[in-house]
Amino acid sequence: MHPIEHLRYVARSHGSDPIEVALETAGAFSSLVNDPAGLVVAARRVVEHHPTNAPLWWMCARVLTALDPRLELRHCVDALQNDATSTHIVDALPDDSTVCIVGWNGHVVDALARRGDAFVLVIDSNGDGQHALRYFDRHDVAAELVAPEGAGAAAEYSDITIVSADACGRDSVLAPGGALAIASVAYCTQKPVWLVAGCGTRLADPLWDAVLAGARFRPDVWATGVDLVPLAVCSFVIGPDGMKPATTASLAPECQHAPELLRRSVY
């Protein structure tokens, strides 16, 4: 497939897993790394089509600011494909724990399936709860779908509440709708809140601002399907480098700012 056609395919793939979109984009970029101007335009256009995909912004920023874009592209692909976040979750989970999650996150559902001994309370978010429930059923994990009106009680009852970050700033994260509610209840009832921030979610400040604006562009932010969760309600952050106390240092950016990504393309 021609790289431009490949990028058009990626641009149209809305609703796909963010990491898969980033990896598909990397495949298209591999034919453009010797054309710096073309790479800049391609990167700018693909993030315009996926304004809330943090791993995609992260990869584009790293490639555009690298001295050797081809080598950096390989490093980004390796980092995404070999992300150890789910393994760190597996290692940290207590035996036979009750865990409250919201929506779908690949690292979280994979870790819970690998452990196999947790009882999972899944809060539905944008229809993703059903996907998680079917996944757990296929892997013989005890799980129950919780209606939104039961979200508070589920977080209070659980041993651990896990919030999955779609994108991270220095002191707050974007997460699936409902995450703020369960994290707040867990915090108020003195239950641990684990923030899962996989590879590519921690962005430089200007890029985080762009993703945040893309996710909460409506005046009725309660209808966007995403929550802005403050780091202050979280106990620990789990990512590719392990489990750490929830401090601003644990959400330090993984990429430099690439100003060219914030300029609008001319179509």
Image (cartoon, rainbow, N blue to C red):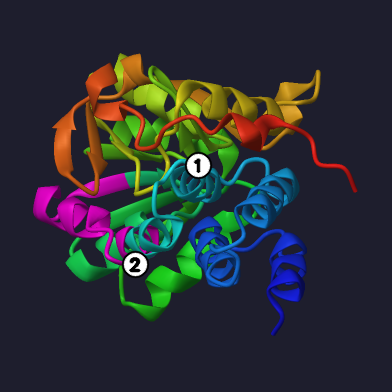
- For residue 81, the mark is 2
Q: Residue at x 49, y 60 (%)?
A: 19
**Disc 2 residue type?**
Gln
Q: Residue at x 37, y 65 (%)?
A: 74
- Image coordinates of residue 145 in percent, x first then y, are 49, 55
Question: Can residue 247 be seen?
Answer: no
Q: Can you say which quadrant of the picture contains the N terminus?
A: bottom right
On the picture, is 143 further left or further right than 2? left
Q: Is residue 90 magenta?
A: yes
Task: Choose the circle earlier in sequence order: 1 or 2.
Answer: 1
Q: How many marks?
A: 2
Residue density around tag 1, few if under 14, some if 14–19, many if 20 or more, within 10 Å: many
On the picture, is 84 further left or further right than 9? left
| First to last magenta residue range | 76-99
* SS assignment at label 2: helix
Question: Can residue 47 be seen?
Answer: yes
On the picture, is 8 further left or further right than 64? right
Residue density around tag 2, few if under 14, some if 14–19, many if 20 or more, within 10 Å: few
Q: Residue at x 55, y 22 (%)?
A: 206
Task: In this rendered view, identify the residue nearer to me: 133 or 146.
Answer: 133
Task: In this rendered view, identify the residue nearer to me: 13 or 204.
Answer: 204
**Disc 1 residue type?**
Ala
Task: In this rendered view, identify the residue nearer to me: 177 or 215.
Answer: 215
Q: Does 71 sit above or below residue 40? A: below
In front of the other: label 1 or label 2? 1
- For residue 61, the mark is 1
Q: Is residue 160 magenta?
A: no
- Quadrant of res 119: bottom left
